[in-house]
Image: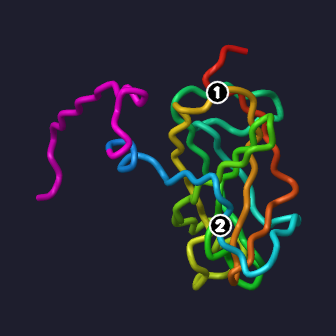
Amino acid sequence: MFWNSVYTLKLRTLDLRKNTKAENAVLFDEISDAAPASLSPPETMDCEGSIESVNASRPSPQITTVENAQSVSGWMGVWARDGQVPDSVYVLLTGGSGKKIYVRAHSTRRDDIKLHFHQSGMRDPGYAALVDVSGLQGKFTLSLARVYKGNLSVCRQFHLPLLINLQP
């Protein structure tokens, strides 16, 4: 009925450096040099959650080389045991000079996390971001931040070294 016995798949190469900003805006999550608005000064804290994938591989404490695009996914809770999740999750890239780049991740469904915490009514605790890093170059640290009830918190435990658009 709804199943076809044959499908056709065409793949094409995207040259992110030649795409217009408008084209890349459709493909990638939004990047900002400014921290998300917060009702109080940002605080550093231990966060519930994990980074489970960086460019479709398990994260490593070793330097990860990234070219043109970076994907990050995982889950984040505030009090997951009570079904509380952040209002938003941010992938945070910090350059060698200390410059910070915030990328608002989009929510993803994570029934495994809901099941683990026995919270079937929990809002989606998963996050994922696809980041256009074609305009970046150098050593960066990948970390996470979250906004909950209008307050920004930077997660203390997530620090993954990246080498963006350079050979190691």
> Is disc 1 surrounded by few (<14), some (14 to 19) or many (20+) residues within 10 Å?
some
Residue occupying image coordinates x 87% and y 64%: 44
Amino acid type of the residue tagged 1 in the rendering: Gln
Residue 139, percent from left and from top: 75, 29
Residue occupying image coordinates x 23% and y 33%: 9
59 or 71: which is nearer to us? 71
- From this view, report whether residue 125 is shown above or below residue 123: above
Q: Which residue is mark 1?
A: 137
Looking at the rendered image, the quarter that the C terminus falls into is: top right
Determine the secondary structure under disc 2.
Answer: loop
Spatial CA distance of label 1 from label 2 is: 23 Å
Q: Earlier in the sequence, mark 1 or mark 2?
A: 2
Q: Within the magenta stretch, is there residue 4?
A: yes
- From this view, report whether residue 168 is shown above or below residue 146: above
Dominant SS of magenta comes to: loop
Q: What range is drawn magenta here? A: 1-22
Residue 63, percent from left and from top: 77, 27
Residue 19 shown left or right of residue 129 in the figure: left
Q: Which residue is mark 2?
A: 36
For residue 165, which quarter of the picture?
top right
Looking at the rendered image, the quarter that the N terminus falls into is: bottom left
Q: Within the magenta stretch, is there residue 57?
A: no
Amino acid type of the residue tagged 2 in the rendering: Pro
